[in-house]
Image: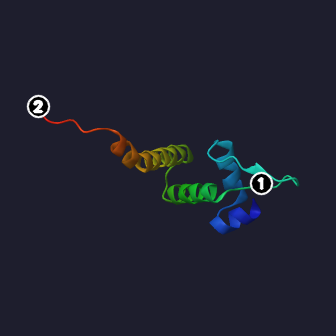
Amino acid sequence: MGRAAEILGVTPAFLRGLNAAWLLTAQRCEGGHRRYSRYQLRIAARMRELVNAGTPLDASCRIVILEDQLAEVHQHRPAARTRRPRRRPA
């Protein structure tokens, strides 16, 4: 956790707060240390941006969740268009 916090320029308490808010769930290694994926580090970096801009933590969590859902929709949208036949105007 300390290294992840250092990379992101945040405190370990900030990362624990994200964990407590259920936004990030770090994996634990055998020694008990938290391990974050690159995806989780990107989310934490976005949270830091929002919080530094004055957005409350709970609102920042909601924004990040919605941004993630929107990105997923955009990722799957082109595939959905190719599978669906077009209707001809009447």
Q: Please tell me which residue is depicted at 87% across the width and 53% down the height of the picture.
A: 30
Residue 20, image x, y percentages: 68, 43
Q: Nearer the viewer, residue 11 or 32?
A: 32
Q: Residues within 10 Å of mark 1 (few under 14, many from 20)?
A: some
Which numbered tag is attached to residue 34? 1
Query: Of helix, strand and loop, which one carries label 2?
Result: loop
Residue 12 image offset from top left, x and y in percent:
72, 58
Residue displayed at 76% across by 63% down: 2
Q: How far, Cα to Cα, is label 2 from label 1?
A: 59 Å
Number of numbered discs visible in the structure rendering: 2
Which quadrant of the rendered structure holds the N terminus?
Answer: bottom right
* Secondary element type, mark 1: strand
Residue 84 locus on image (x, y percent): 33, 38
Q: Which residue is mark 2?
A: 90
Q: Nearer the viewer, residue 49 or 87?
A: 87
Frontmost residue, 41 versus 74? 74
The disc labelled 1 sits on which kind of residue?
Arg
User: In the displayed structure, does residue 85 sit left or right of residue 50?
Assistant: left
Residue ranking furthest to the top = 90
Q: Amino acid at mark 2?
A: Ala
Residue that sits furthest to the right in the current view = 31
Instruction: Mark 2 or mark 1: name the one nearer the start of the chain.
Output: 1
Which residue is rendered at x = 51% and y = 49% of the image? 64
Give the image location of residue 39, x and y in percent.
60, 56
| Residue 54 shown left or right of residue 21 in the figure | left
Residue 2 image label: none
Position above or below: 52 against 81: below
Q: Residue at x 36, y 41 (%)?
A: 83
